[in-house]
């Protein structure tokens, strides 16, 4: 099977829209790969693996002896390639990275009402001593890592600073470790991956639908965009302050009632702004060879442009 696309527009009236959506998704991915020196061949191999994973997920009840043929028919990859990819998949045991105690500490610091001031901002904490202190917060998160080690990691990431009065101050409203590229790339994959999965499932008609909405405005100045940033940050702080205590309470309720805790949930907020591409000037109408009579322009009624 080759990679040709159906040409009958009546059979796939949504094909143009689907291809446009895929292109829009691929452009930032290609930009990331080019910026980080990731060769096309490596990305292509990853795409092949993802196609095989998706095809197997679409046919969960397929008999193992028929898997290669079914995946080949579904994806357009040849049988030999599919067999190689399935064999490599079965031989590997990918594991999901554990949650970082540093990110858990910052999340608790941002969300715990006892660690925030009247305006919702995280309080500076005494470096040592009983709660509320950085030492007590660190020990509440984990007993496996010394509070001093957690503090040193926060300082390395630029997420906190120690003031002259020996209090520790959170340096960022949200934990985005800009100096730790490995974690940043992890956040990119997990956050954007789940966001994209939510949108894909919604397009597929999932019920109930995931919340996946946005506001869009394409006629703003740089000053207007900057003026929106405090509002966006305030909404994130409010979501964080309300959602985390609720999630912790629900988790405790699940444990108390012995419910199966096999679900995961990711909540997020994003904003993006960039300059619009310059618009091409409208082509001027060619001058007529001789003056031509123009039709009379109708009078504008109130409210018309």
Image (cartoon, rainbow, N blue to C red):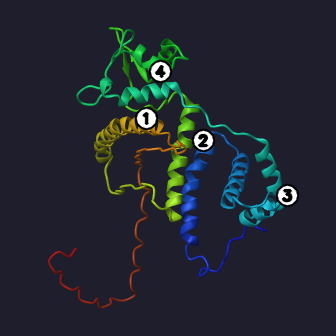
Position of residue 92 measured from the top left corner of the image (x, y, whole percent): 76, 41
Q: Mark 2 or mark 4: which comes first in sequence?
A: 2
Which residue occupies 51% across, 25% down?
A: 101
CA gap, disc 3 and disc 2: 33 Å
The relative height of residue 257 versus residue 214 in the rendered view (above or below) is above
For label 4, the residue is: 154
Position of residue 58 measured from the top left corner of the image (x, y, whole percent): 66, 61
Task: Look at the numbered discs 4 and 1 and tell me whether their residues touch, using CB distance below 8 Å.
Answer: no
Q: Which mark is residue 80?
A: 3
Q: Between 254 and 128, which is closer to the camera in this rendering?
A: 254
Which residue occupies 80% across, 64% down?
A: 69
Q: Secondary structure at mark 3?
A: helix
CA gap, disc 4 and disc 1: 28 Å
Q: Mark 2 or mark 1: which comes first in sequence?
A: 2
Q: Mark 3 or mark 2: which comes first in sequence?
A: 2
Q: Secondary structure at mark 1?
A: helix
For label 1, the residue is: 252
Asked which quadrant contains residue 5, the reply is: bottom right
Q: Is residue 64 left or right of residue 206?
A: right
Task: Look at the numbered discs 2 and 1 and tell me whether their residues touch, using CB distance below 8 Å.
Answer: no
Q: Mark 4 or mark 1: which comes first in sequence?
A: 4
Q: Is residue 248 left or right of residue 205?
A: left
The relative height of residue 119 versus residue 32 in the rendered view (above or below) is above
Q: Between 172 and 220, which is closer to the camera in this rendering?
A: 172
The relative height of residue 211 versus residue 35 in the rendered view (above or below) is below
CA gap, disc 2 and disc 4: 27 Å
Quadrant (top left/top right/bottom left/bottom right) for the N terminus: bottom right
């Amino acid at each position: 099977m080759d990679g040709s696309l159906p040409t009958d527009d009546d059979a796939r009236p949504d094909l143009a829209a689907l291809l446009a959506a895929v292109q829009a998704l691929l452009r930032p991915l290609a930009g990331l790969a080019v910026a980080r020196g990731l060769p096309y061949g490596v990305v292509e191999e990853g795409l092949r693996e993802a196609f095989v994973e998706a095809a197997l997920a679409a046919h969960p009840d397929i008999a193992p002896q028929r898997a290669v043929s079914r995946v080949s028919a579904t994806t357009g990859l040849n049988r030999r390639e599919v067999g190689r990819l399935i064999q490599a998949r079965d031989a590997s045991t990918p594991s999901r990275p554990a949650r970082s105690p540093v990110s858990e500490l910052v999340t608790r610091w941002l969300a715990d009402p006892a660690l925030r001031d009247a305006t919702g901002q995280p309080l500076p904490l005494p470096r040592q001593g009983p709660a509320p202190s950085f030492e007590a917060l660190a020990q509440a998160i984990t007993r496996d890592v010394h509070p001093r080690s957690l503090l040193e990691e926060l300082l390395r990431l630029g997420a906190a600073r120690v003031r002259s009065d020996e209090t520790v101050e959170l340096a960022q409203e949200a934990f985005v470790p800009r100096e730790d590229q490995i974690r940043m790339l992890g956040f990119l994959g997990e956050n954007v991956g789940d966001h994209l999965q939510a949108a894909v499932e919604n397009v597929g008609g999932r019920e109930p639908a995931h919340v996946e909405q946005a506001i869009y405005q394409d006629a703003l100045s740089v000053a207007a965009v900057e003026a929106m940033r405090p509002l966006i940050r305030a909404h994130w702080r409010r979501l964080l302050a309300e959602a985390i205590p609720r999630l912790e309470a629900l988790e405790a309720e699940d444990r108390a009632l012995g419910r199966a805790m096999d679900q995961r949930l990711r909540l997020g907020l994003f904003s993006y702004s960039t300059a619009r591409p310059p618009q091409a000037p409208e082509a001027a109408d060619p001058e007529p060879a001789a003056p031509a009579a123009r039709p009379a322009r109708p009078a504008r009624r109130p409210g018309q442009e």
